[in-house]
Amino acid sequence: MSKVVKLKRGLDIKLNGEVGNTVNSVGNCSLYAIKPTDFRALIPRLVVKAGDQVKAGEVLFINKYKPEIKFTAPVSGTIESINRGERRKLLEVVIKADNEIQYKDFGAADVNKLSREEIIERLLDSGIWPMLRQRPYDIIANPQDTPKAVFVSGFDSAPLAPDYEITLAHDLEALQAGIDCLKKLSNKNVNLNLRANTPSSSVFSKLKNVEVNYFEGPHPAGNVGIQIHHLNPINKGDIVWVINAMDLAIMGRLFTSGKYDARKTIALAGSEVKAPCYYQVITGAQIGSIVNGKLKNEVEERIISGNVLTGYKVDTNSYLGFYHNMITVIPEGREYEFMGWATLGCKKFSMSKTFPSFLTPNKKYTLNANYHGEERAFVVSGQYEKVLPMDILPVYLLKAILAGDLDKMEQLGMYEIAPEDLALCEFVCTSKIPVQSIVEQGIELMMKELS
Amino acid sequence: MNFLRNYLDKQKPKFEKGGKFEKLHSVFTGFESFLFVPNRTTSSGCNIRDAVDLKRTMIIVVIALIPALLFGMYNVGYQHFKAIGALADTGFFELFFYGLWKVLPMIIVSYVVGLGIEFAAAQIRGHEINEGFLVSGLLIPMVMPVNAPLWMIAVSTAFAVIIGKEIFGGTGMNIWNPALLARAFFFFSYPSMISGDKVWIAGMPDGFSQATPLAEAALGTPLNYDMCSMFWGFIPGSVGETSTFCILIGALILIATGIGSWKIMLSTFVGGFLMAFLLQNVLPETNPYVVSGMTPLMHLVAGGFAFGAVFMATDPVTSAQTERGKWIYGFLIGVMAILIRMLNPGYPEGMMLAILLLNTFAPLIDWFVVQGNIKRRLKRAKAA
């Protein structure tokens, strides 16, 4: 009983530098890192020290308050360094990779013959568990919970996002094992959401034992939070688990091969990339090893791990984020613009109709990281609602967060949102309000006060 | 523009903390960001941002006001030369420049007083200067009679900015539309200067008097003007409010750019029309408006109704902020404006009070809409 959900609200930001169809391999990448900062609300406890030897799948650090949740090495090699920030905050555990990856063996097995407990144990031991996240709060799932459903989004609608049909083209077996695994974890309620009109030749169309629904409409239709809201909304006390489709393949491989095989195909896209295309990398790869030699180097560039709406700024010495499936490179735009607010602005993009961009809906733009204005109080109303396809009043929810009013946050739908779902609100905001940070702040507050 | 940029960069340290002109920091950054969009780039959240900002938004509203303002200037000249009986031998530009000469000082006074207070308030609070007054400062002279003494405009503006806006926290925090608050203050402090038959025409010869069509209708005298001249705007009235045609051009600009809410505009006109239609059929035939022959449609083009509906009611800060709330809010403004106008003939200009009243109740309207959302969520939880 598949449903087709048509979403009207949202916004597709069309950017230059769309990724081509070819998949290349990156040359030599010797440094990899796992960053505890990629995991919301995690307090890590380190279990290795610089100089230690690790195999792929061996533990680097654990969750201090839930030691069964482990974070493991994506490659085998020597611990190169432990990078810390202010107040000795753990930032990166860097591994210098061996030439040939040695995998810790977790034992291949048929998922359908394992019990739920055995599956959970394997996922925890291999360090794949952190790929499973729970809503509300968008944090790592708690192995003691049983979710009411598991959701997987089969497409990414963000600007310049990779096409999963290409990145997962050869992973049917692994995806099926992943789905079977989720089925055991969630009492058989696994939802896969695809773009409407997904062809039957698609790798996702071949998956069995999963409830498939379809979504139509602009970004954020591919966000799993939006999909949950329309299919099985989260009420107080509900727990839903989600996993990214790319991570699902890695999860499946644990059972088909018995290894933590963290290879994935990511997109290198954006207006400052010479020839945007896909690259085969391993989770945590050094950014420089992927982008060096492939950028235009014409202007000051901003390299983003992730997409332009939710990713974060990195430099070439930094590493690919744990949950990220793409690297975007755009101009930084650190320049003054004379009377910029008064110009006609044919090269500028705006959802509002105050710039001519609304006359040419299919034109692609080169956007930079400039604020295009200054922060102000909320003035314009009705703007966020246009890009949030949920029955939620975003401004009232944000104001409740700012006021620290837990009751109101709960009543207005705090359990249903993650920062990424409101990313477009932040993009379109006339007053340049830091929407995603406010949502983060709200999640932190709720977790602190209600648990 | 490099030389200007270099100059600003050189002056900048003087205005920063510890600099010579530290006390003018807000003013400096205000002007700097007026001239140049800052070079700040994103550091958290979205890496890219929409090109629109508050300056762009406000300038669109100013552009939308320009047709009504230019016509207002022309009409000031037109009414003057008509009153002295020299309309036939006066050229278009003479009329316009006469009006420009009368209206320009009002605009300057409003901007100087209002922006001065804004600058000072921003500096005291350590905030940046907000763009809100760019619009309010132009609205204020447009809702005043042309003969309003400049010092009264100055006092009204100061009242509106300080009491109406700054004590609440500045742009975005105010409860009432600042421009209307200025007019309300003016109206109740100096009633003789904003009503009656002496103030609407600049440089009026002695012994000549001319009330607005609305005031005439309120007295039950038959109308001097037909629907047509009221729509085009060749009638006495506040500077910017007379020409419904020019106001509708402004409305088109606001709706096309999405800056003004078409829901509020439409529901205000609908509410006003329905109320006027209802009252005309219900009220006894002795009601002055019925006597004077005002049709419901005429109510929408007379006085400040159209101007208020398009430019005042749609102020995003003081109007209802939920989409459903906007329908209710606009409709009630229309209803209240006509209700006040027709049932209280001593006070024909109902629009100002209707909008201020609904500004006050807008948060209440929104509260009901928000409660609706909360209830839907609770119901969903129970059903599951």
Image: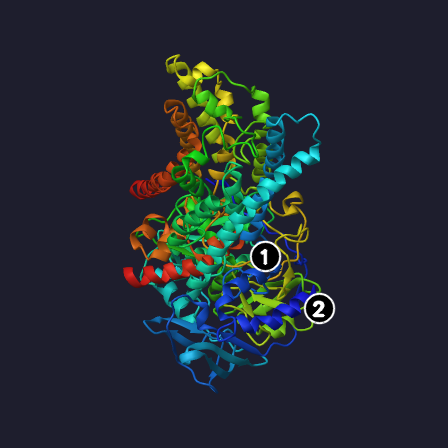
Dot 1 alpha-carbon crowd within 10 angstroms: few under 14, some 14 to 19, many 20 or more: many
**Coordinates of residue A151 in the picture (x, y in percent):** 44, 52
Query: In this rendering, is residue A80 above or below A308?
Result: below
Q: Which type of secondary structure does the marked residue at label 2 adopt?
A: loop
Q: Which mark is residue B273?
A: none
**Coordinates of residue B238 in the picture (x, y in percent):** 52, 34
Q: Sequence-wise, which precedes: disc 2 or disc 1? A: 1
Q: Report how far apart the C-alphas of labels 2 and 1 lie in the structure.
A: 23 Å
Q: Quadrant of the N terminus of chain B?
A: bottom right
Q: Nearer the viewer, residue B348 or A19?
A: B348
Of badges 2 and 1, nearer the viewer stands: 2
Subunit ID for the residue under disc 1: A
The residue drawn where x is 62% and y is 74% is A289
Q: Nearer the viewer, residue A157 or A126?
A: A157
The residue drawn where x is 50% and y is 79% is A94
**Coordinates of residue A317 in the picture (x, y in percent):** 58, 77
Dot 2 alpha-carbon crowd within 10 angstroms: few under 14, some 14 to 19, many 20 or more: few
Q: Which mark is residue A298?
A: 2
Q: Which mark is residue A161?
A: 1
Judge whether residue B351 can be spotted in this image.
yes
Amino acid type, callout 2: Glu
Query: In this rendering, is residue A153 above or below A447?
Result: above
Q: Residue furthest front?
A: B206
Q: Which type of secondary structure does the marked residue at label 1 adopt?
A: loop
Q: Quadrant of the C terminus of chain B?
A: top left
Query: In this rendering, is residue A104 above or below B322?
Result: below
**Coordinates of residue B30 in the picture (x, y in percent):** 54, 60
